[in-house]
Image (cartoon, rainbow, N blue to C red):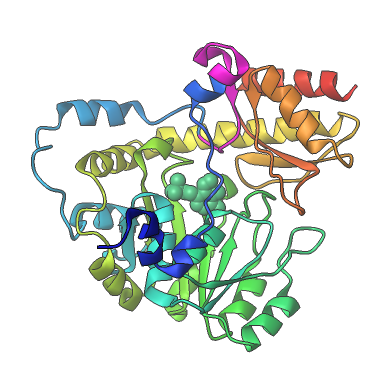
Amino acid sequence: MPNPKDIRSLMLPHMLDAVPYAAVDPPSVLAARAGLAEDDIAKLDANENPYGPSPKVAEALASYKGYHIYPDPQQRRIREALAAYAGTTPDRIVAGVGSDELIDLLLRLFVAPGDRVIDCVPTFGMYASFVSVVGGELVSVPRTKTFDVDIEAIRKEARQGAKVIFLASPNNPSGNLLSEATLRQLLSLDLLVVVDEAYYEFAGATLAHLIPQHSNLVVLRTFSKWAGLAGMRLGYGIMDPAVAERLMVIKPPYNLSVAAEIALLASLDDKALLLSRVQSIVAERDSLFARLRRIPGLVPLPSRANFILCRLAKGQGHRVYQELAKRGIFVRYYDTDLLRDYIRLSVGLPQQNKALVEALQMILS
Ligand SMILES: Cc1ncc(COP(=O)(O)O)c(C=O)c1O
């Protein structure tokens, strides 16, 4: 028996170096930090949907009678419903516990310890975290000044060997899209290309139509943003049937809960309402962008998602984040070299956005 003190020596060496994802705190913790009631804070730090889920979700969950039965390991009904929504066939769909689970499963399918994975930074931090969990070697390729991917730098890294590249479109946190021309160039490289379309409904643009011609393309989507179900954990991927078949084998058999399945089907049943809310958020995003542009000392970046990245004067990022937090307005601040002078604002309800703009005007005046 090993000495309990030595238990870490039994762990996989690369797990000891695993990098945590900087996840956001729940409203109760944020409210306590600001000394306010939960209802009085504006949670604009995780690109959640301020309208919440469709009312049909609560109705369907309340009336369901089969919670004592395991969910369908083949995800038959939801793969069919998702295929209809995404304009594809069920054999190309796999659903996961958030799109996060699909990122993890794809890495486990393709990446062994020491394999190289390309990450176009700054981007969604979960890719780097999950790469560290499988012991992959993360190759960070910085984006250009406009946050576009640097195709020449990627090509160079791919030539030295890489198994996977992650590309969020729109990119989190910059909000810009990956162009089809750029993706086509990347698809000709010999690696798996994961295009993460978590904000697809807000952007109204997709690259999923390239999947039938490219078995090395996977598109990820989520119900966390457009459908207001971040807490329910529901994501899916669209991919070549050969990739889907293997993911279905390696995923935990009952990965999605029955509750998540019900929420997914009820959301798709109420698609029109949810998409009209998406349109309200898009209109509010564009109005917020115009108001932010008028604030001296703050430069908002055009966004196709439900958030706006803002550049501040050198050294101001953390101060502005803290000043907003004191007022009960929580936005995303990244203490990293590339983003130290930025804050990312999720688009909230109109009154929250108004309070945000007023607070920023005061803080920066
Ligand atoms: C680009 C991107 N991908 C994936 C996710 C996570 O999605 P999910 O909640 O489905 O795990 C996020 C969440 O912020 C994101 O920004």
Where is residue 273? Give x, y as percent.
42, 32
Q: Is residue 64 above or below residue 143?
A: above
Q: Quadrant of residue 307?
A: top right
Where is residue 155? Give x, y as percent.
68, 82
Where is residue 202? Give x, y as percent.
56, 44
Magenta stretch: includes residue 39: yes
| Front residue of this view, candidates 142 and 348 | 142
- Compared across the picture, whether 251 is left or right of 339 comes to left
| Front residue of this view, candidates 45 and 135 | 135
Residue at image x 33%, y 54%?
4
| Front residue of this view, candidates 287 and 46 | 46
Residue at image x 66%, y 73%?
181
- Compared across the picture, whether 219 is left or right of 171 comes to left
Q: Is residue 116 above or below residue 255?
A: below
Q: Is residue 182 above or below residue 324?
A: below
Residue at image x 57%, y 13%?
40
**First to last magenta residue range:** 32-48
Q: Quadrant of the C terminus?
A: top right
| Residue 199 visible within the image | no
Magenta stretch: includes residue 262: no
Where is residue 359? Give x, y as percent.
76, 19
Residue at image x 38%, y 64%?
11
Q: Is residue 6 above or below residue 31?
A: below
Q: Quadrant of the N terminus?
A: bottom left
- How many numbered callouts? 0
| Residue 361 visible within the image | yes
